[in-house]
Image: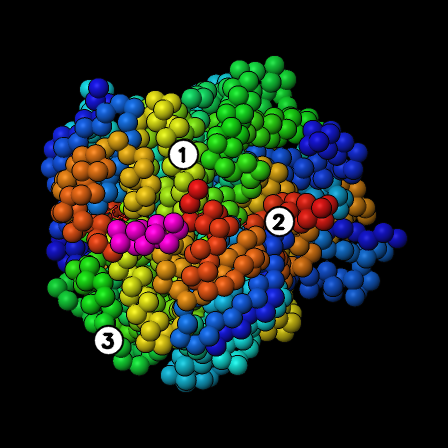
Amino acid sequence: MLEVKSLASRYGRIPALAGVTLHVRAGEMVAIVGANGAGKTTLLRTLSGVQPPCGGSIVFEGQDLLKLHARQRVQAGIIQVPEGRQVFAQMTVEDNLRLGAFARGSAHHLDPVLDLFPVLRDKFRELAGNLSGGQQQMLAIGRALMARPRLLLLDEPGMGLAPRLVAEIFSRIAALGKVGTTILLVDQNARAALGVASRGYVMETGRIVLEGSARDLLHDRQVQRAYLGSA
Amino acid sequence: QEAIRIGAFLSVTGPAAFLGDPELKTLEMYVERINAEGGILGRKVQLVSYDDAGDAEKARTFAKRLIEQDKVDVIVGGSTTGTTMAAVPLAEQSGTPFISLAGAVPIVEPPKKWVFKTPHTDRMACEKIFADTQSRKLTKVALISGSGGFDKSMRGECVKVASKYGVELVADETYGANDTDMTAQLTKIKGSGAQAVLNAGFGQGPAIVTRNYRQVGLTLPLYQSHGVASREFIKLAGAAAEGVRLPAAALLVSDILPGNDPQKPVVSSYRKNYEDRFKSEVSAFGGHAYDGLMLAIGAMKTAHSTDKGKVRDALEATRGYVGTGGVVNMSANDHMGLDLTAFRMLEVKDGKWSLAR
Amino acid sequence: MSGAWLQFIASGLTAGAIYALVALGFTIVFNASGAINFAQGEFVMVGGMSAASLVAAGVSLPLAILLAVAAAIVVALVIERVAIAPARHAGTVTLIIITIGVSLFLRGLAQLVWGKGVFRLPAFSGEEPIAFGGATLLPQSLWVLAGATLAVLALRFFYGRTLAGKAMLATSYNRLAAQLVGINTRAVLFASFGLAALLGAVGGVLIAPIAFTSYDAGIMLGLKGFAAAMLGGLGSFPGAVLGGLVLGLLEGLGAGFLSSAYKDAIAFVAILAVLFFFPGGFLGARSSDRV
Amino acid sequence: MTLLAVRGLTKSFGGVKAITDLDLRIARGAVHSIIGPNGAGKTSLINMLSGIYRPDAGSIALDGVDLAGQPAHRFAAAGIGRTFQNLQVFFNMTALENVMAGRHLRERHSLAAALLRTRALQRAEAESRQFARDLLRLVGLCGQEDTRADAMAYGALKRLEIARALAAQPRLLLLDEPAAGLNATEAREIDALIQRLAQGGTTIVLVEHNMALVMEVSDHIVVLDHGRKLAEGTPQEVSAHPGVIEAYLGKAEVADEDEAEAAHA
Amino acid sequence: MLAAFVALAPLALPNNYAYEIAIQIALNAVVCIGLNLLIGYAGQISLGHAGFFALGGYASAILATRYGVPVWLSLPGACAAVGALAYLLGRPTLRLKGHPLAMATLGLGVIISIAITTEDQWTGGPDGMQVPPLVLFGLALQGERAWYWITGALLVATVWLALNLIDSPNGRALRALHGSEVAARTLGIDCTRVKLQVFTLSAVLAALAGALTAHYAGFITPAKASFLHSVELVIMVVFGGMASVFGAVVGAAVMTLLPQLLTVLKDYEMMVFGAVLVATMVLFPQGLVPTLARWWRWRMQ
Ligand SMILES: Nc1ncnc2c1ncn2[C@@H]1O[C@H](COP(=O)(O)OP(=O)(O)OP(=O)(O)O)[C@@H](O)[C@H]1O
Ligand SMILES: Nc1ncnc2c1ncn2[C@@H]1O[C@H](COP(=O)(O)OP(=O)(O)OP(=O)(O)O)[C@@H](O)[C@H]1O
Ligand SMILES: [Mg+2]
Ligand SMILES: [Mg+2]
């Protein structure tokens, strides 16, 4: 479904991606783990089109993505949940969610998302900026789901969420994967991420250094030492 | 041989553009004509002009530039009193003859050795108006004025000379240069018991005053200043301008001047030249520049030299020069040389200027 | 004195309606980019000048108005493409300076095209003042008031009820997030300039019979319109209109009862006082800076 | 040995009661964690303890001095430092300058001294710079001293905020989700850092959702729910509290951990 | 480096007119450095500094002409008075941020300007007033060359002071409150006080430059207090580069010179000036100096 070949990107002169090659099959959930500054966020930004690449190729369902603007990629079903939530702080929860479906244009239903995150129903008319950190995180995910993503790019969806919710969100994400949404997941909670994913990649300084099934990675000594906090 | 250099700093843009624009056009046109006729003293004439946009600080810098860098022989310019006064010390220090095109009294009072001016003063305008109200037996006059330099200066002069003509000022209102509605001020005037209203101002403000004047139902005689002496005023004020009086130079009514008027040939020819060339109506202001240039040229011819001191002396000795503004007779104490007869009292009739009475 | 009272109010409303129209234009661009477009006054000027010069050239008033509005929109769109879009990542202050540059450019251009004269447009429905309770109002003032009312209703509907309007707002709040939900942020900025010019030009045409117009009319309109937008609350359309009317009334009443020389100062003192108590203006968003 | 005593603290926003009548005692030198579901009021509490929000009612006494109602910089001057859940880094400065800005309270000079760059000031600046470098090393940002903050990755910024707060050498340090965005290994480094600070005598209030970290470092845990205290006690007591499991921890998490441990073994 | 430049520049100045421009640049630069501390470093916009500039000039002139205060005293007196006024006005004003702050400072400037225009018995009204020359140690300071050295020295001193300030804890506090006011407060920075300090400092610098401009020119008009002059000052700051002391100097220099150069274009002047401004800000969104500096660094590496 998604084929990324030697993708590179830089901030000014500083390279952040130095040739990333990976692929995601339809319906699959793939996790990416890596230390701070490894370039995970940059990778997702480049995939969604808000960050210009400086080399390589991205092919999505046979289509060359580099030719498409961010907006066209959203229309093609590539939706990113950005790092740091990025909700429309001065707008209500409702408007945030409705805007999530902006690119789809057609009629949209809020209920599935509100059922997934009942808090959002309580705060429906509140300004998003007044929500607590975790509530905003839920809103950001909910907004992305409103677009009915085909490929969902999740950048640290569990950040700032209560443990109970993390577990819940990850299981919902897994459920999404089962009904056919393809997911590329970045999370610092590597254990949880690899727990729900089928495959994983490990990134270091802008490169993929390891790939394999999630189970193999979970049991890889190096991965355990570097990312799972095991001594 | 090197060209004679005439320097000019004018408010070609900015709020006083309606002064500077015709002034510059006039200077450019006549310098061209003079050169076409072979120049003066056997030399070509070169005009060096700058736009000060009505800013005194800029005017000073440009005056310095004219004197220090361009080394001009004489300066004709200073569209407004503010810009003129900024350049006066420089002309005095460097000893450069300077003919100002601005109105206020302090330019020539007290007289300054190197500074002259061509337009009538605002005090003369006040006197002309008050003489008119006196003859119509109107003694209670309401003042309304803009907040610009011209407006405030004229207001001040009018306040000073009012008593001389037995005029009592019963209201004193102000408006801003860009205000869009003056009915509030006029309503106050309406309640003041005035028998006539005098508006000291220039630009579009007076046209709005005139329209608002009719809107609030005022029917008293309305006097405007020489600052709106152009067709544009009638165009903007429309039907409301009917009956408005103002003091102005003969230029505006050149076509209806009696044939024996000494100014008739001068103003008719200037008008024709200007209107043929620029396809727009003359105003009194371009005429001031014409007079300034001609006075300077005349002085150089008389002096047979461009020596600054000699030109200055010749300027001061100007007698009987007939210009667009009137007949000029300068002296050591009078660096303007005009009297009240230079002003005509005009009235708007059927959308045109006419001589009052 | 009651007649005088009313006339001061009428005077204030006349000026206020003009400010309101300009303030609405500020609000549109602000709501798409978060920046103040100091060229808004010039859009008004371009509309008024085009219409006035066309009418002077013999074009009928309705056609002249149409052409003038079209001209202003074209100018605004070109400017957006050339000057604003390339700098859309720059900071707010830089954007403001760019719009100031644009306003100078347009003023210079207008001066070349139309000269430095003052122009007037014929009133839409006669010049006969309408008298009420001892005060008078020009019919054109009612046109201006009606124009402002209509504009604010239309804008409120567009921004409050339609997803396209919300998308424009969203772009100013968070451009990254707007891109990620599929909003064409460049088109939003483009459209907002077109819309602001449309409104500005209509305003310019409406006010030209009262306030006249000249190449430099935009300076004062820009200043007062900005003040009105701030007073009403930046970003709020009803606020812009309210701010405009209040500003006009402050001036009218200030000139009537206190001092005509200080009427602008009185208005600004009042604005300062309002801002000190409601930093967001009358109807501005109560900002939430949560941490 | 109470350092901070909070009594009857209340704060609401419109209809939302963020914190209701809360009492709290923070013992000197200990690590206190505050946990609770999203929206429980943890950040609001931290905001009041640092003077950002003015409480509707209640007192906040540091060493017996009530600070409630004072401006935020007085809280700082009294010895309270903090980090932010939503980053509040000075993005217009380098990492080193960010930390040096944290020295503000320790390095005060008159405007005149600053303008004239007096000897005393130069000396103090040099010391400050060294201190800031040491702190950056401490949080693991060695080598990034001269990077502008807007070019740093999220995780690095979180640590930068900690270093900046430490620069003021606060008596009481409030950390709002310091480990968010860090992976387990990196979280462990924060863990070690917190313990080191605590040993050095700094009192710490930690808000965090990373239970591994919380359980490891806390001497005492307070659980908030809907702005009220739900439970309080040692890590063991709290993690076994049924109300806490129900409202916050959930069963899954515990199961997950077990599974992972099992897999590891 | 700047000092050397100031010392050597006279070799290239052909006449008094050139000196005049140099003096104007120096005086404008002094205002811009102060304003840049406020706008560029502390992130607090002011659209009213022309008011302080003009007040400095008027106050010194009025003290000297009406009250016979010697100019060497009236000048610092005026600066102190303007500083005190800015301090008082700044108290409520600086509680605002962003656009409301811009509006409020604009309002202050406009009010000052209206007062100056209207109170003509003090100020001479719209046409301005005459200002006596600066007398130092019993010597009337006259002539472009003398003024060049005075203003040049003042500029060098101001740059030095500003650079010192920026690289001090106080300067960091300024930038910190720009970056995040909440964070700055939790570090013990009294933001209200810091803002007030820099606002007052910038107002005093504006007043100083205003007073010197007035004494140098021999007159002053209300145009110096106008909104347009305030905008001009801000343009200088942004054009040269925000948060850059040399940016302020370069901005002042370019924006003083440019109109003098463009004046040959006559009717096209305003258009071209606008276009140049737009083009520069589009190409150098950070302002001239920071963008060029970055470019230079990039080249060097
Ligand atoms: N706006 C920027 N300008 C310059 N450099 C940047 C910028 N954003 C990120 N970088 C650099 O790019 C590199 C990759 O950053 P990125 O944010 O992609 O990392 P990450 O893997 O998502 O890290 P984290 O886990 O901390 O979120 C880092 O070295 C970072 O410093
Ligand atoms: N400034 C504000 N305006 C309105 N409501 C607010 C404001 N600040 C907080 N709230 C509300 O108060 C409640 C508590 O928020 P707070 O940020 O303290 O939660 P939290 O415990 O930190 O949650 P999280 O773990 O998700 O960060 C939330 O419901 C939030 O919406
Ligand atoms: Mg990241
Ligand atoms: Mg929180």
Query: What's the amino acid at mark 3?
Result: His
Quadrant of image for the C terminus of chain A: top left
Q: What span is in magenta?
A: D253-265
For this view, does C23 lie left or right of residue B38? left
Give the residue at mark 3. A109
Secondary structure mostly seen in the magenta stretch: helix
Give the residue at mark 1. D192
Instruction: Report the chain holding disc 2.
Output: E
Using a 10 Å C-alpha cutoff, classify the residue at mark 2 as few (fewer than 14 neighbours), some (14 to 19) or many (20 or more).
some
Q: Residue at x 13, y 30 (%)?
A: D7
Check contact, mark 3 vs mark 1: CB within 8 A. Answer: no
Respond yes or no on whether mark 1 lies under 8 Å from ligand 1.
Answer: no
For this view, does E125 lie left or right of residue C9? right
The answer for how far apart the CA atoms under marks 1 and 2 are is 42 Å
Q: Which mark is residue C120?
A: none
Instruction: List x then y, in percent, for residue E183.
Output: 37, 37
Check contact, mark 2 vs mark 3: CB within 8 A. Answer: no
For this view, does D48 lie left or right of residue A33? left
The answer for how far apart the CA atoms under marks 2 and 3 are is 48 Å
